[in-house]
Structures are given as C-alpha cells and as structure tokens.
C-alpha cells in the first residue's frame, strides 16, 4: 500500500508539473494584463495539432520547437487585433472575448483536422519505462519533467535576469510607473502574451504525447489551471507553480483513497484555500482584490 | 442627427439588419435527399460537435447511405425519403430535447433517430414517447433505454452492456485467468458493464481483485494503472470509451503493463483504436460490428460503398446508423402504414434481411424489449492486419440472442397505449 | 443611471411576449423555442441584476441555475411533488447555496471574484456528475415529467399542451421580473447602482457594501434558480450540463449582447442568442464558430449591446 501511495505521490508531481506549465502561461498573462485567457486551452490544442501536422516533415524534435513558436505567433496576432483594445477596461470583456475565441478554436481544429482522435507518434525510446519496478516512470514522463523544468527555469531566469523580464515584473506591480519611465507598455504586454501562449503551445505538444489528440483536449485542462492559480495565489508565479504541483499530488492521492473524487478534490482544495487563506498560498494581499 | 458620427449610424444599421435577420424565416435544416411535397421524413438528432462528434457523424453517414438505397429502391410506401439532421451537441440535453421537438413539431418528421449519448437518448425518448413517434436509438448504450426506461415506441440497435459483458467474459477467463481488476466509467454505462462482467465472470469462477470508478473525461490514468498493477491481477479491464480509452491504453502501454498483465475490456470501437499509436493497439475486446468478415455475403459490398462515400472502412457506428434508417423503411413497409403504433407492433421479433444485418447470426428486435439482438465480435486489437485499417482480429462471433439475458432480467416492462 | 424603462417599450415587450407562440410559428419558430427564450431571458435578467446593476461579474451562475433544475426534478421524481412545490424546492436549495457561497466570496472583486465563481460553479457540476445514485450522474435525471397543475377550480395541463406551459412560464417570468423591477427601483436598488458606479464613495456614504453585494448575489441566484427549475420542466429532464461554465458564459453574453445597463437588455440578448443558435446549428455544423464570433463581435463592436446602441442612436 505504501508503495502505491508513494508511486502516486511521485506520479502526481509529474502530472502536477504539467498542470503548472499550463497554469504559468495563464498566470503570466493574467498578472500583467488582467485578462483571463479562456482560450488558453484552445491554444494548447492548436500547439498539439500543429505538432502532429509537422512531425512527418521535421520530426518530433523539430515539431517540439516549431509548434509552440507558431502558436505563439498566432497568439501575438490575436493579442494585437482583439485583446489590446480591451486593456484597462472591465475584465468582463476580456473574459467574454477569450470565451468566444475558445469556441472558435475548438470548431476550427475540428474543421481542419476532423473530429476523430488522431494517433500522436512519439519517438520509440521515449515511450518505454525506465525500470520494471518504477514502471510509471516512462522515458516520456521524465522527458516532460525535463522540458517543464527547462521552460519554468528559463521563464524565471528570463524574468529575473533580462531587461524584458524586469519590465514585466515591474509592470505587474505598477504599470503606470513603468510606462512613465519610457517603456513601451503595448509591446511589453504583447511580448508577455506571446510568452504565455508559447507555454500553452508547449504544454499542448507535451499533452499530445500523453493523451489522445482530439479537438476537446484543451477544454478539460483549463479548469485545473484556474484552480492552480487560485490555490497558489494570484500575482505569484511561484505560487502558480506550487499550486500546479499540489493539485497533481492531491489528485494522485485521491486516486488511491477516494477515486471518484480525483477531479473534485482540486475544487475542494480551492474551497479550503479560499476559506483559510483567501489570497492563496503565495498571493499578495490586495492584488487585483 | 444626420451628421452624427457616421460610424455609429453604420453600426446601427448593421444591428437593425441583424435583428431583421434573426427574425427572418428560419428555413429548414439540413436536407440531404430530394425534397418533395409528400416526402417521408426521418429526423436524426445526433452529436455533430463535441467529444462524441466523430461517433455521431459516422452514424450520420450510415443513415445517409441507407436513405440513398431506400430511395433507389422506391422509397417508403412509394414516397421519397428525406433525412433531416440536427446537431444535438455531445451533452446538452436541453438542446437535444429542443431539436427533437423541432424535428417532430416543426419539421413533422415521421421517425426520430438518435442519440450517441446515452443520457440524451433517454431524454429524447421521453419526447418521442409523448409525441408517439417511432424512435430508433442507433448507438446510445445505457441499458435503461431498453430496460428500466423502455417505451413501446423506442427501439435500439446497439447492444446492451449486459450483452457485451456476457460475450467477452467467457473468452477472457478461458484464455487469461480469473483475477480481474476493473477500471470503470463512473456512470450508468460503466456501472452496468462492470456489474454484467462481474456476474458473468463469477459464474465462470472469476474474481474481482479490485477496481476503480473513474470520472468521464479523465486525462491521466497513471494513478489508476499504478493501483491496478499493485493488485496483481491476470487481466485489467478497461470499461471506458472514447478519448478516455485512448488515453488509458496509451499510458498503459507506455508503462509496459501490457507485458505483465493482460489488457482487455468489453466495448471497443474502431474510432478510439485509430487514435492510438500502433504499439498501443492491443487487448481483448468485443465489437458490436466489424467490417472485415471474410466470405460473408453482402458485407464486402457495404464496405465498398462506405469506402467510396467516406474514404474509409465502415465502423460499427456506420452500421448502427445504416440499420436505424433501414429499420424505419422496413417497419413502414411491413405495417403498410406510417402510424407509430402499427409500425412498433410490426417490429416485434422483426428479423433484418441479411444485406442489412451484415453478420453471421440472425438480427432481430426482441419482442417486448425492442432491443436488436445480432452478433457480437470478440477479438484482439492489432496494430495492422490484412490492411492498414484492419485493427481488430476477430476470434469468435457470439450470437446476440444467446448473450442477452432473459427479458425478465432486462427490467423492461413495456406498456402499450390502448 | 437608473434602470432604464421606456414606458412604451415595456408595453411593446409585454405584448410581444404575450403572443409569442403565435407569431413564432409564422416566422418558422416553434413553441418550445419561445418557451426557451422566456426561460433564458429570465436567467439572463437575473444574472444582470448582479452584473449590470450592481457591477459585479459572476461567471458561475450556471451552478444555481442547475441547482434549481435538479431541485425541481428531484422533487417531482423522488418526492412526488406538484409543479409549484417542486419549483419552490429548487429555488430553496439554490438560494441556500448562494447564501453560503456568497458569504465566502463577497470580499473578492473583479477578476478574482469571477474566477472564484467559475471554480465554485464547477464544484456543483462535479457533485451532480458524481453523485450518481441521487442525481443520475452523467445520464441525468430522467423518467419523470411535469404534471398538470390542479388549481382546485381548474386544471392547467402543462404537460400535454406546449402553449399552456409557455403561458405558465410567462406568468412565472412576469412575477420574477416585476419583483426585480420593484427591488431595483427601491432605495436598496439605488444603493446597488451607487456601488456599481463608485464603490469607494458608496462605502464612505455609509452603504454596507459587502452586505449589499451579498444580498444582490443571493437575489440574483434566487431568480436564476427559478429559470433553472422552469428549464428542467421544459425538458422533462435535467443533467449536469445545466451546471457547466459554458452556460454561465452564455448567460453573460446574453446580458451584454442585449445591453447590460438596461432592464430588458438581457431578454433581448437571450432572444437573439437562443434564436441565432437554433437557426445556425440547423444549417451548419460549424455553429460554434458563429457563436464564438458573436462573442468576439459583441465585445469589440457592440459592448453596450443592442439596446445601448439603439438608445444612443436615439439620443444623437
């Protein structure tokens, strides 16, 4: 039994890392621009489908690099055309717009690639287990962890050691002052959005290897991202990371003791956090109320 | 006011014309065949969007093929047939019910077909029963449709979960052992499937060493697979479907579980198998219909016809749709009437002709239950068989009539209007 | 800005509603569509009590809509209640939930409040989904239907007769809408508007802001649950989809499409949205893109909604 529990905790961390990747992109956009990007799941799905289409031409590794970039490019276009005019306005409009975009994304992916689930082929050496004892540690899951660590590490490094990153962090605290200091806030927001979408696209490529590839793949993953942000605390990327990991582990434990509740448990966690510490684990007081 | 902001005026005009459009005549929905004043209409209320879209659309293709054949053979009671299609969505009962009412009340269909989603089938059955329309359910599996919630006007083509359980339990125990672990969808479909399998397996000496009820739409099956492996079973049964089936099998193979334990289940379909990478197409399953039946009469023609129309081999869903539409025509022909009551009576113990049954055993609607009993194909999934789309190797064909329990056990107590 | 009510406009709306089953057929609609418009209109107007008039965004109203639906359905199926007691049961359940949840979240605002309402909405969705034995799980709650109402002196057959049910729903709609109008025109309603316009100033003026928002939330959820109960009765069925966030999103877009600042705005929005969705989904599989496009166009070009534009057009 302990073995099952341990395995599930460890596996939960792996799954949680994946949730964290997706939630981080969402959090990045939310913190700087105040937009709840309901279409995040749609971008994830798009990243996955683009990878699927590109693999026959540039192989899995090529697709891993190119698909998120393409997705991010589309994200930049959408940001410039549709989302930019909404900044500073009622958050309602951002939510509604991205909600509508989510519908469109699902329909367009179904239209282009069909409703049928598509077989996503991974390189063979990735899909085998590393050991018989710890069979759930497959090459692919390790690979996922590596990618997530690299992406998250890269993100935190960029935020802390580059000028762009510094501006984003400053902008999250006080965008007006940043603007007064001569930073082009519009470009800053666009780039920030682009980075967030890049992470969604990357999460999509990873997801396709793990799950089946169908037009509704994004819809199931967006809710855990929200919960990760609420649990971890708005305004804190580290919080979101922690939130994602905690959700993964909670689900894993629930699977052991209370299987019917593996999905509901994350909402229970959210409820508890809201009761006990409303701003989230690492959230900042007063941040976006 | 004339020189007010011109942009604003243009927007107003746009809105006004938009309102006019919204209030304009709602023209008729999809019309597939030729429209004639006295055409017989079959209404299909099935998912064309959402997670069940691929299944729903395949059923639609089957219906369309049947309609074309029916028309070519003179139609229904000498009248041309028309298929009217509405998207029920994959899960919104409100929409499914509203579309059903639209088809019955607005388009005045003579028959109602649908739904892929069990819950929506039940909801639509209430409407069809209230309106006294003949209703054929092509692919909604919950047992209640021809069980506890059966109605005189509602017929079903696909099997009940009990039938599937009975068909496959035998094969599993004989070949692989007695200790079963169940990973089951946590709703009626899964519950009845598991109950059916437990019953069938116990009768043959099987035991349940453990199990998990999993929520529909689970992306990650790793925790359940970890638990399953720890219980040390002979067979892990995946009583799930659709994308969940794809996820679970993919992950199980990545874990190398297929090398330690037998992976199997009950219901399987081509659609989820096609979504799997070839190395994950494994396991013992039962399909309700399979295209590769060498030497069977009529089947090859059906396969060719679907290939020409859809560019792929037929799946069980195509067959469900095909049978459903044809059942309408045959019922009307036998009853010589389009009255639901007459046709329903005509369908009691009605046998499908071989070119529609497309299987080795006789296919008939059991009287008092309105459930089609045909053939069940037990076999193994395979990466590739005689052709790239031959993903299933049939090892045994079970007679549906034998796999079904008694009428009593189904729980259906049918009442007829006077 | 007080809830805008143009007297002739009110009359026009009421007359259109009164005769909808009749003119609906003439333009190719059908009675159930009309009833659905009334039910969704009520839901959207209830949401707008909170959104448009108090200025608080909830994206999780589907939860209370669904609770109303399940309460009524379970009342009829398991307790054998009559129609009106069943609706009352649904409303009671939803309102109690709203009171509890409202208390938890009332200190949050803006984006955070919206996200939290989404998440709580999902909790109820999962409850309905998981609690199979009681709610029927994913299969939904079926095997029951609305019963004719016996008033003692007469029986209203709302089961066999679609038009009868339409008028029943319309009466319920009228009662709720009248109640909302009265509330909005009362001092309480005015203080809600004050909160919407400038919360800090309202607080300085001594308005108990949190309590008012909580109360507005509860009232809004109460009326939305009435709509939910009617919806269950309309379909003779309810399932977990009635609780999902897509429905919440649709209600918000209906309110915005018609005009958030206007009393009848959400009803107009609901009529357009429901009719459009029905029409488009009959003609193309890609109706989701069309609906998504509606969301995008409304936000980008018509944020004040139909009535907002007509009004400013009239003013110009």
Image (cartoon, coloured by chain):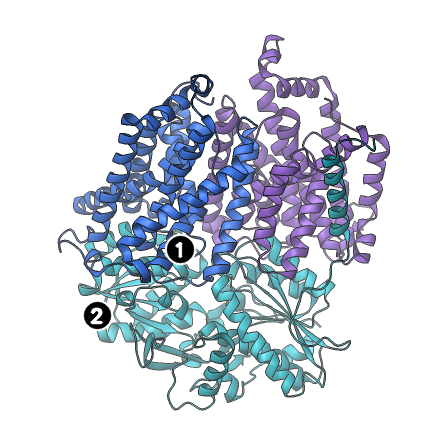
> In the picture, which chain is purple?
C
Q: Nearer the viewer, residue A203 or B176?
A: A203
Q: Chain of mark 1?
A: A
The residue indicated by pointer 2 is: B177
Image coordinates of residue B339 in percent, x first then y, are 71, 76
Image coordinates of residue C74 in percent, x first then y, are 57, 47
Name the residue: 64% across, 79% down.
B345
The N terminus of chain B, quarter of image: top right
Q: Contact (CB < 8 A) between labels 1 and 2?
A: no
Q: Secondary structure at mark 1?
A: helix
Say whether residue B303 is left or right of residue A18: right
Mark 1 to mark 2 CA distance (whole Å): 40 Å
> In the picture, which chain is cyan?
B
Image coordinates of residue C253 in percent, x first then y, are 62, 40
The C terminus of chain B, quarter of image: bottom right
Name the residue: 58% across, 18% down.
C211
The residue indicated by pointer 1 is: A49
Residue A18 image label = none
Q: Chain of mark 2?
A: B
Image coordinates of residue B273 in percent, x first then y, are 36, 67
Q: Nearer the viewer, residue B243 or C175?
A: B243
Q: Nearer the viewer, residue A87 or C7?
A: A87
Q: Quadrant of residue A228?
A: top left
> In the picture, which chain is blue?
A
Name the residue: 51% across, 59% down.
A111
Q: Is residue C88 visible?
A: no
Say whether residue B68 is left or right of residue A245: right
Q: Residues within 10 Å of mark 2 (few under 14, many from 20)?
A: some
Q: Is residue C104 visible?
A: yes
């Amino acid at each position: 039994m302990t073995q099952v529990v341990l395995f599930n905790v460890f596996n939960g961390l792996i799954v949680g890392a994946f949730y964290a990747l997706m939630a981080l992109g969402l959090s990045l956009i939310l913190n700087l621009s105040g937009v709840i990007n309901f279409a995040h799941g749609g971008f994830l799905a798009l990243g996955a489908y683009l990878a699927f289409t590109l693999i026959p031409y540039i192989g899995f590794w090529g697709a891993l690099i190119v698909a998120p970039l393409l997705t991010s490019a589309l994200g930049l276009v959408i940001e410039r055309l549709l989302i930019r005019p909404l900044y500073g306005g009622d958050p309602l409009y951002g939510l509604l717009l991205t909600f509508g975009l989510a519908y469109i994304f699902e329909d367009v992916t179904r239209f282009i690639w069909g409703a049928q689930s598509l077989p996503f082929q991974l390189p063979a050496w990735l899909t085998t287990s590393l050991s018989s004892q710890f069979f759930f540690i497959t090459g692919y899951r390790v690979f996922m962890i590596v990618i997530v660590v690299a992406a998250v590490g890269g993100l935190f490094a960029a935020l802390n050691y580059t000028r762009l990153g510094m501006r984003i962090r400053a902008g999250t605290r006080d965008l007006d002052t940043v603007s007064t200091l001569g930073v082009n806030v519009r470009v800053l927001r666009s780039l920030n959005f682009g980075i967030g979408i890049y992470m969604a696209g990357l999460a999509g490529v990873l997801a396709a290897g793990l799950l089946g590839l169908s037009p509704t793949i994004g819809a199931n993953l967006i809710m855990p991202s929200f919960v990760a942000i609420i649990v971890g605390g708005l305004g804190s990327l580290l919080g979101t990371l922690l939130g994602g990991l905690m959700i993964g582990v909670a689900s894993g434990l629930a699977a052991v003791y209370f299987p019917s509740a593996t999905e509901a448990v994350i909402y229970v966690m959210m409820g508890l956090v809201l009761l006990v510490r409303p701003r989230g684990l690492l959230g900042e007081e007063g941040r976006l109320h | 006011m004339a020189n007010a902001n011109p942009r604003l005026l243009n927007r107003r005009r746009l809105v006004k014309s938009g309102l006019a459009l919204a209030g304009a005549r709602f023209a008729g929905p999809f019309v597939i065949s030729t429209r004639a004043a006295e055409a017989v209409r079959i209404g299909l209320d099935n998912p064309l969007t959402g997670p069940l879209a691929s299944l729903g659309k395949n059923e639609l293709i089957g219906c369309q093929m049947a309609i074309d054949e029916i028309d070519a053979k003179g139609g229904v009671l000498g009248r041309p047939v028309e298929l009217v299609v509405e998207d029920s969505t994959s899960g919104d009962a409100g929409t499914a019910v509203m579309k059903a009412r639209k088809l019955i009340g607005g388009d005045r269909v003579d028959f109602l077909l649908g739904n892929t989603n069990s819950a929506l089938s039940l909801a639509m059955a209430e409407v069809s029963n209230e309106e006294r329309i003949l209703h054929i359910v092509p692919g909604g599996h919950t047992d209640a449709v021809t069980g506890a919630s059966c109605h005189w006007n509602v017929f079903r083509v696909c099997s009940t979960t009990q039938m599937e359980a009975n068909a496959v339990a035998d094969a599993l125990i004989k070949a692989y052992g007695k200790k079963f672990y169940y990973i089951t969808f946590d709703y009626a479909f899964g519950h009845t499937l598991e109950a059916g399998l437990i019953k069938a397996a116990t009768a043959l000496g099987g035991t349940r060493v453990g199990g998990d009820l999993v929520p529909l739409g689970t992306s990650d099956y790793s925790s359940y697979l970890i638990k399953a492996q720890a219980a040390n079973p002979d067979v892990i049964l995946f009583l799930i479907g659709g994308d969940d089936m794809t996820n679970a099998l993919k992950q199980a193979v990545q874990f190398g579980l297929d090398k330690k334990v037998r992976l199997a289940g009950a219901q399987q379909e081509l659609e989820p198998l096609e979504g799997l990478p070839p190395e994950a197409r494994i396991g013992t399953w039962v399909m309700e219909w399979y295209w590769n039946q060498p030497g069977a009469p009529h089947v090859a023609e059906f396969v060719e016809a679907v290939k020409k129309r859809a560019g792929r081999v037929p799946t069980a869903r195509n067959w469900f749709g095909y049978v459903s539409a044809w059942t309408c025509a045959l019922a009307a022909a036998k009853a010589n009437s389009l009255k639901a009551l007459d046709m329903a009576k005509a369908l009691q113990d009605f046998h499908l002709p071989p070119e529609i049954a497309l299987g080795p055993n006789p296919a008939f609607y059991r009287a008092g239950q309105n459930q089609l009993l045909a053939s069940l194909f037990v076999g193994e999934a395979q990466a590739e068989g005689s052709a790239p789309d031959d993903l299933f190797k049939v090892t045994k064909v079970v007679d549906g009539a034998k796999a079904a329990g008694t009428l009593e056990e189904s729980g259906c107590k049918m009442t007829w209007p006077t | 800005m007080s809830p805008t009510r143009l007297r002739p406009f009110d009359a026009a709306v009421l007359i259109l509603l009164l005769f909808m089953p009749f003119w609906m057929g003439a333009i190719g609609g059908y009675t159930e569509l009309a009833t659905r418009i009334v039910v969704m209109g009520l839901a959207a107007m209830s949401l707008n009590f909170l959104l448009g008039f108090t200025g608080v965004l909830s994206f999780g109203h589907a939860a209370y809509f669904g609770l109303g639906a399940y309460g009524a359905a379970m009342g009829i199926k398991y307790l054998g209640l009559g129609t009106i007691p069943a609706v009352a049961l649904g409303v009671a359940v939803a309102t109690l939930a709203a009171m509890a949840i409202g208390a938890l979240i009332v200190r949050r605002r803006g984006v955070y409040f919206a996200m939290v309402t989404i998440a709580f909405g999902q909790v109820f969705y999962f409850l309905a989904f998981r609690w199979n034995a009681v709610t029927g799980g994913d299969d939904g709650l079926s095997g029951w239907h609305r019963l004719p109402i016996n008033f003692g002196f007469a029986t209203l057959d709302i089961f066999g007769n679609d038009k009868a049910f339409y008028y029943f729903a319309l009466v319920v709609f009228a009662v709720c809408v009248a109640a909302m109008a009265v509330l909005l025109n009362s001092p309480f309603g005015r203080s809600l508007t004050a909160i919407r316009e400038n919360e800090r100033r309202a607080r300085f003026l001594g308005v108990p802001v949190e309590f008012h928002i909580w109360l507005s939330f509860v009232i809004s959820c109460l009326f939305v649950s009435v709509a939910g109960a009617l919806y269950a009765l309309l379909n003779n069925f309810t399932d977990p989809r009635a609780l999902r966030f897509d429905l919440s999103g649709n209600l918000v877009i209906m309110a915005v499409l018609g005009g958030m600042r206007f009393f009848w705005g959400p009803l107009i929005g609901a009529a357009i949205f429901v009719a459009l969705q029905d029409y488009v989904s009959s003609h193309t599989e890609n109706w989701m893109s069309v609906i998504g496009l509606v969301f995008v166009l409304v936000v980008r070009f018509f944020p004040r909604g139909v009535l907002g534009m007509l009004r400013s057009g009239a003013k110009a």
